[in-house]
Image (cartoon, rainbow, N blue to C red):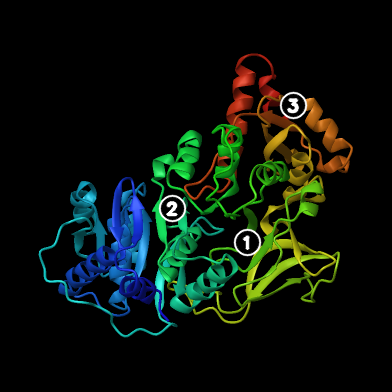
Amino acid sequence: MTLHRLAIDSAARHPDRLAVSCGGDTLTYRELDDAANRFANRLREHGVGRGDRVVLWSDKSVDMIAAMQGVLRLGAAYVPMDGTSPVARVTMLAADCGAAAVCTDAGRLAEAGTAIAGSAPCLDLHSPSTMDIDPVNEESDDRDLAYILYTSGSTGVPKGVCVSHRNARAFVDWAVAELAVGQHDRLANHAPLVFDLSVLDLYAAFAVGASVHLLAAELAYAPAQLVQFLYEERITIWYSVPSALVLMVRDGGLLERPAPAALRVVCFAGEPFPIGGVRSLAGWTDARLLNLYGPTETNVCTYHEVTPADLDRDRPVPIGRACSGDTVWAQRPDGTVAGRGDDGELVVTGPTVLLGYWGAPPQRGPYHTGDIVRVLDDGSFDYVGRRDHTVKVRGHRVGLGEVERTIAGHPDVDDVAVVLVGSGIEARLVAFVVPVRDRTPGPLAVKAHCARLLPSYALPEHVHIGPDLPRTGNGKLDRPALVRRHTELVARRAERGLVPAGQKGKAR
């Protein structure tokens, strides 16, 4: 079954149930059905049809969700763009995917129309329509393209991840079954619509006639507002990157209130969750805690539900074992399958693996994630780090993930990131540490902790203590920003005479 059939079927079964809300705006399933049909008819008038791509460039709104559904009903594919994306990026990606239309809001329409004129018609995403509502449900195959999510790619050049209906449904169907999602559930949508985490929020709700509650982008990292949203919206299923949960605990007063009775599932994904944060959540709520893993190219391909034994670990919980119908294994550099206790690159095959990247040959065979994992005794996996986060320091190979896990084991550390600065003989490790609330671990204490557990060549030469770590728009760690932050901090210290100008790169 194709993705858009989920909301169509729920509209037939539960027309008056709440489908989606955002900032006070709401749509029932009947209203969502009507809005999607209106939008599909408008696109059809502009020549959009099966196989076309439609760029949707806007902030989160109920209209944005209706537009996504309208595009799918034509057998076309949507390409979401965040409202904060500059017009130059939208223009570039619209041209890259050969968009048949660009839909945005009135505030961006004039700018977009000027910039994209000649390549695709620009439509007002929120324009009311007086057209008759003709139901639209073009014949589609589950192997057809459903949407394209652009990622930055390892080279910094955006890559369009092409996802079919089958790819998405394999994950959604698994999630609905595993989380026992029902029509009375209220799912939070924290992630941007350009991020694959949002697929669970939207389509698991639509699959059963539940409701999804969109969190505006400007509130996504506002701790007090996040906590208020959780309680006021009576959320039953929460899914976000760990950094949002860390903020809610550290700065939002989450643990100072009784856990909401409605909350029954908390999922996290996108980055390792420091074990201290997991312990805090486990002691606060009886809700199920699940670590979901997978790159955009596979969506979620492994999962692990937190157990009491996990809370005794000194590192993040495992990423677990295969799900969504996929098969996963760890592969050694020589191509053989890694055994228990060994490390290797995680490889995925199965129904969630992407069709391919837009403009590139179709994906053939297994997908190599670039993530290094360790095979545990029960056959599940621990996340070790990125293949491209293995660095050389004075000739020694060091995994940044191993250093981060070690620092995260310090009782006063809430979050941590380690980066490599410099190159060759000047290469050195720099750690950025966010302390547990009301605690102040000093750089020397962090270094002493590392010295007890790591070889000398893997010790960070500089430790910065600060209130937060920079994040990308998707909430993931922004490592290039950390390198820039280090350079700025050292430069300031040099200006204050704390570091001789000629030794800026060797600051302790």
Distance between the alpha carbons at the discs numbered 2 and 1? 17 Å
Q: Is residue 231 left or right of residue 335?
A: left
Front-lying residue, 150 or 383: 383
- Kindly identify the amino acid type of the residue bearing the numbered disc 2: Pro
Question: Furthest residue to the front?
Answer: 261
| Mark 1 and mark 3 residues within 8 Å of each other at the beta carbon | no
> Amino acid under label 1?
Tyr
Point out which mark residue 192 bears: 2
Res. 100 image quadrant:
bottom left
Residue with the mark numbered 3: 441
Toward the top, the furthest residue is 497
Q: How many marks?
A: 3
**Residue 168, horizontal then vertical, whole percent:** 48, 72
**Residue bearing the label numbered 1:** 293
Task: Tell me how far mark 1 sits from mark 3, CA to CA.
Answer: 31 Å
Amino acid type at image mark 3: Pro
**Where residue 210 appears, x then y in whole percent?**
42, 63
Numbered circle sitting on residue 369: none
Looking at the image, is mark 1 or mark 3 earlier in the sequence? 1
Quarter residue 423 falls in: top right
Distance CA(mark 2)–CA(mark 3): 34 Å
Q: Is residue 19 above or below residue 48?
A: above
In the image, residue 449 sits, relative to residue 124, either above or below, namely above
**Observer-nearest residue: 473 or 248?**
248
